[in-house]
Amino acid sequence: MVTKTVGKLGREYNPQDAEKRILDYWHKTRAYQKTKRKLLNRPKFYFLDGPPYVNAAPHVGTAWNKTLKDAIIRYWRMKGYNVRDQPGYDCHGLPVEVMVEKLLKLTNKKEIEEVVGIGNFIEKCKEYAAENVEIQAGLQGHRCMDGLG
């Protein structure tokens, strides 16, 4: 990566390419890890990032929420705080259960017991939540430095 002073952007500027080069540079230099290590003995700032519901795939509101939270984390880290940023997911039952009921085309709660079986239904809910956590965790990796941890 070139370390010259910022100047005029050429007509060939491609933001996706620039982002890739920057992320590659951060990864190669271990910038995120070095920053966290440098701030280890500084005042602490705790930030529990969550909870996005895992009852559906992420949408534009999820991205906006993550962007705002990312700005807060970066602000406190740039102010010299030892930031503990911990992602969290809301995997509680009802929203996930409702989505699984729709997927299984159940029309009432009694069908959970009589048609699917409680144990099987619980497993389906766990699988559904785990799939959506994986999708959302994959998006976390796109959050620039946070994906380099």
Image (cartoon, rainbow, N blue to C red):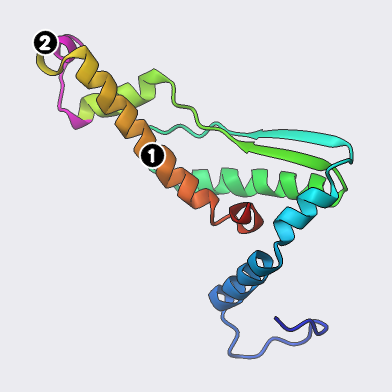
In this view of the protein, can residue 58 be seen by the observer?
no
Query: Helix or strand or loop: what does disc 2 sit on?
Result: helix
Indicate the quadrant containing the N terminus: top left, top right, bottom left or bottom right.
Answer: bottom right
Q: Residues within 10 Å of mark 1 (few under 14, many from 20)?
A: many
Q: N-terminal of the two: label 1 or label 2?
A: 2
- Graded by Cα atoms within 10 Å as few (under 14), some (14 to 19) or many (20 or more), the crowding at tag 2 reads few
Above or below 37: residue 108 = above
Q: Report the number of numbered marks.
A: 2
Dot 1: what SS? helix
Image coordinates of residue 96 in percent, x first then y, are 35, 26
| Residue 101 point in image, percent of width and height | 22, 24
Query: Who's the residue at 16% across and 9% down the image?
Result: 110
- Which residues fall within the magenta stretch? 103-114
C-alpha span from label 1 to label 2 = 27 Å
Tell me, for residue 114, which label it has, or none: 2
Q: Amino acid at mark 2?
A: Glu
Residue at x 73% of width, y 61% of height = 31
Instruction: Determine whether 110 is above or below 132 in the image.
Output: above
Q: Is residue 18 left or right of residue 42?
A: left
- What amino acid is found at the position of numbered circle 1 in the picture? Asn
Q: Residue at x 43, y 38 (%)?
A: 133
Residue 75 left/right relative to 90 = right
